[in-house]
């Protein structure tokens, strides 16, 4: 006799257990079906963009640099779509987010914020274990369900081999809108979105995307690229490209180094200025031989350009010729000297000592 006068018949217990097993089976098969549906959706959607799919599809463990490159290109393009959409709407919601050390106003717009959200979550959802540093703040309530469909563009498949590295050795740097200042002035040609992948602090993958020209340059060190250096550069009388909105004493430094007749090209955006050193099929892209920046600058502004130049045999260093490490702090204190297919060390040696002394290395 069971407690409280209830008698358990063996048949009743068996039926109860069978019912329980039935419920468990139903729940489990539903879960499996959900996962299968998610994978099927990935297969059906194929190439052409990140899609809002379940997060249990993300890979774990070591990361493949070829996959990181594919997602970085996609992130730059998807961010660029936001940048373009906001600019074309003419509702920029421009805000001041602070001042640079030199006292220039740092601006932020809806283009920066929305691009940042797309780029950050596409990369984060695809590579959850990787450190991502981005120019704009990411609010957790703004979490975006944007996922990579795992497709790799044909040109990347052709030129780049798979290569795995430990996830903890990777730092990704995102610039969701480079040349924000110029963006607010509707100087669209200077605007880029950029992604950089550093491995153990060294820039390895660089993506620079121009949203208003639908042009994307990518390169991987010891891998390949879809962009190349120009066939010649003027070493004796180089055209120097410099900042138009954070110039500091750069014109003075350039003239002191290369003479009073030196051609100086003021331009917006660190991404744009690196592309000026390369062979870029864009009518609105000016061409230069050397890029110099003398004020403080952040690593998300320069890492992608550094990786692209390095992959193509060029150099981006501080003004004293030091390599820049893309881990740790966000800032680069030592100024910037970028060149390709010229004697970079000779340029370093030519720069005035005064300027070298006034910049300390991080
Ligand atoms: N002194 C400084 N302090 C902080 N950021 C700087 C800077 N000089 C340049 N930058 C940033 O570097 C990028 C390129 O600058 P420039 O166009 O002047 O060459 C811009 O990035 P964002 O537009 O992404 O903010 C700009 O804000
Ligand atoms: Mg920038």
Image (cartoon, rainbow, N blue to C red):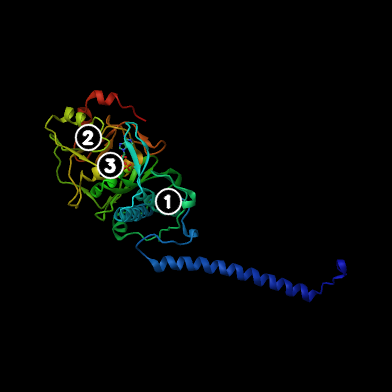
Kindly state the secondary structure of the residue where label 3 is placed: helix
Q: Is residue 57 above or below residue 224?
A: below
Q: Indicate which disc, 1 or 2, sits on the residue closer to the N terminus.
A: 1
Q: Residues within 10 Å of mark 3 (few under 14, many from 20)?
A: many
Q: Residues within 10 Å of mark 2 (few under 14, many from 20)?
A: many
Residue 177 image offset from top left, x and y in percent: 33, 47
Q: Which residue is mark 2?
A: 344
Q: Which residue is mark 1?
A: 63
Residue 219 visible, this orientation: no
Residue 268 image offset from top left, x and y in percent: 25, 42
Ligand 1 near label 2 (Cβ, under 8 Å)?
A: no
Distance, label 2 to label 3, CA atoms, is 18 Å
Kindly state the secondary structure of the residue where label 1 is placed: strand
Image quadrant in which you'd find residue 299: top left
Kindly state the secondary structure of the residue where label 2 is placed: helix
Ligand 1 near label 3 (Cβ, under 8 Å)?
A: yes
Q: Are marks 1 and 2 in contact (CB under 8 Å)?
A: no
Q: Indicate which disc, 3 or 1, sits on the residue closer to the N terminus.
A: 1
Residue 53 image offset from top left, x and y in percent: 45, 62
Q: Is residue 317 above or below residue 154?
A: above
Q: Tell me the residue at 25%/26% (across/down).
A: 355
Q: Is residue 252 above or below residue 145?
A: above
Rendering quadrant holding ligand 1: top left
Mark 2 or 3, closer to the camera: 3
Q: Tell me the residue at 23%/46% (across/down).
A: 275
Q: Are marks 3 and 1 in contact (CB under 8 Å)?
A: no
Distance, label 3 to label 1, CA atoms, is 28 Å
């Amino acid at each position: 006799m069971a407690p409280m006068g209830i008698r358990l018949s063996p048949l009743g217990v068996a039926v109860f257990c069978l019912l329980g097993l039935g419920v468990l089976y139903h729940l489990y098969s539903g879960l499996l079906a959900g996962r299968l549906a998610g994978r099927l959706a990935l297969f059906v959607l194929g190439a052409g963009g990140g899609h809002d799919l379940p997060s249990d599809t993300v890979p774990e463990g070591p990361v493949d640099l070829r996959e990181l490159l594919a997602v970085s290109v996609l992130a730059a393009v998807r961010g660029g779509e936001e940048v373009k959409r906001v600019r074309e709407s003419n509702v920029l919601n421009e805000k001041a987010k602070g001042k640079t050390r030199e006292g220039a106003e740092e601006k932020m717009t809806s283009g920066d914020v929305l691009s940042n959200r797309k780029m950050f979550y596409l990369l984060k959802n695809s590579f959850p274990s990787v450190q991502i540093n981005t120019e704009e703040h990411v609010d957790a309530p703004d979490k975006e369900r944007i996922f990579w469909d795992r497709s790799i563009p044909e040109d990347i498949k052709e030129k780049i081999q798979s290569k795995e590295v430990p996830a903890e050795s990777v730092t990704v740097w995102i610039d969701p809108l480079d040349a924000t200042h110029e963006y607010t002035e509707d100087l669209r040609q200077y605007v880029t979105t950029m992604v950089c992948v550093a491995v153990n602090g060294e820039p390895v993958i660089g993506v620079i995307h121009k949203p208003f020209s639908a042009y994307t340059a990518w390169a991987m060190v010891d891998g390949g690229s879809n962009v190349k250096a120009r066939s010649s550069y003027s070493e004796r009388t180089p055209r120097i490209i410099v900042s138009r909105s954070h110039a500091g004493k750069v014109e003075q430094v350039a003239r002191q180094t290369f003479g009073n007749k030196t051609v100086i090209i003021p331009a917006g955006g660190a991404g744009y200025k690196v592309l000026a050193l390369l062979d870029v099929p864009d009518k609105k892209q000016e061409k230069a031989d050397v890029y110099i920046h003398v004020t403080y600058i952040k690593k998300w502004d320069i890492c992608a350009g550094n990786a692209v130049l390095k992959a193509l045999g060029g150099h981006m260093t501080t003004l004293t010729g030091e390599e820049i490490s893309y881990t740790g702090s966000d800032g680069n204190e030592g100024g910037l000297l970028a060149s390709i297919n010229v004697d970079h060390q000779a340029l370093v040696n030519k720069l005035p000592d005064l300027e070298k002394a006034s910049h300390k290395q991080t």
